[in-house]
Image (cartoon, rainbow, N blue to C red):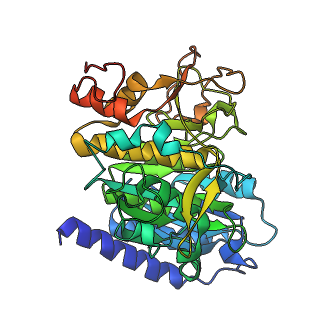
Amino acid sequence: MRPRTLARLALLATLTGACSGIAPPSPPPNAPGDLQRILVTLHPAPLPAWQRDVVALAASHGLFVYRAWLMGSLDRPCVVYSLPAGESMGRMIARLTADHRVESAQPVQRFEVLAGADPYAHLQHGAAALGAEAAHRWATGRGVLVAVVDTGVDVGHPDLSGRVVRVGDFVEHGRRTFTRDVHGTAVVGVLAAAAHNGIGIAGIAPEADILALKACWPKAEGASEAVCDSYSLAQALDVAVIARAQVVNLSLSGPDDPLLARILAAAVERGSAVVAAVDPGRPALGFPASLPGVIAVAAEGTPFAAAGGRTVLTAPGDDILAPVPGGGYDFFSGSSMASAQVAGVVALLLERRPDLSPSQVAEILAASARPAEPAGTLRPVSLPVAANPTGQDAAPPAPTVGPFRVDACRALTRLMGVSDGCGEDTVTAH
């Protein structure tokens, strides 16, 4: 093991050990599920200073140390503190932000997976609409590592056998339900269900390697609706970055989150293609789809407010057949399914050209896509400053580009310079 890796593990163990010895004034009731939690990063400093500051901040501000760990993607210690009963979140964040030991402080925010509400309808052939079967002549996603940050996954489902190569659980008590979670199972199935096995369906990238990271938990047992928070998502995304996942799928949305924006910017900078579902209920595509460098995907036919100048890609999102825990199948709708399908197409491209940058992937998808008619009027709006991880002023709004339906076959033929590969119009490489 490399010295730097050993040092990181030693730091994590030291911080966790130190924090476990804190005696807070009075832990808030139900601390593990309490939303009154603050996510703090500390300035770079030698190990003894980091260890001391984690402990000292709790004592100085009357906080309860929930957990501390080293965030490898940003090379920063990250601490989750719980507030004492009756303490004001805004006041505490102001105090921590003014503390010279603190780099950033923000609330632990809530996110939701973008599950549809109308299952059980006629079969929607999403993979056929994307030209996946034709694309499989050239690529199946073999060897491409795709991180799915979602709920847990039924890794024993017959159609997912061998597809999930590693799992991570960042939800309290999540191991009890990991393989019973519906939404993550459906997303992974749409993306990478095995092909030609005589069972169920075939995913868009049926030979991709899935890194299943549980950062969300179902609202109720057996429900497809699920929620996540900044804390669980930060841990999962950090693992995806350190694992060098080539694709990261985020079929979820929530409020603008500065720390998550920094981690996702690091992922893109290191070469990960990040695909995120558009939230039609939020302005400017919703977070994290609104972030620069992120491939934003909406369910085809869904009206949404588009950020100025952003290319919006679409994929089928109505009545998509997908695996469910226990070996069965069901129909799902929403941007979650659209995002998963496009993440699969990205895996196909990266099998053929692993050196493609995230921006090159996005350009190929847009250049080879087909015009798609939106169900509502697209309204260009400015990108919120909070969603811009560079801190620079956003450019003035520009006309919205799209939406366009992704076409897997056309994208691959464009990449490879193959003519007449999709049985229709010729697509040439540039």
Pick whichever, 114 or 282, lies toward us: 114
> Where in the figure is residue 271, as x and y percent of width and height?
31, 43
In the rendered image, which quarter contains the N terminus?
bottom left
Query: Is residue 228 depicted above or below 176 in this figure?
Result: above
Q: Residue furthest left?
A: 2
Indicate left or right for 285 with 188 as reference.
right
Considering every residue shown, the one lying at the far right of the view is 86
Q: Is residue 224 above or below residue 358?
A: below
Residue at x 66% of width, y 68% of height: 218
Which quadrant holds residue 89?
bottom right
- Nearer to me, 333 or 83: 333
Would residue 110 appear left or right of 403 to someone viewing this image? right
Q: Residue at x 41, y 48 (%)?
A: 204
Residue name at image x 43 percent, y 75 percent:
15
Residue 88 in the image: x percent, y percent? Answer: 78, 59
| Quarter of the rendering containing residue 361 | top left
Up the image or down, 266 lies above or below 414; here it is below
Give the residue displayed 35% in from the left and 34% down from the top. Answer: 409
Q: Position of residue 210 (x, y in %)?
A: 38, 61
Q: Nearer the viewer, residue 136 or 394?
A: 136
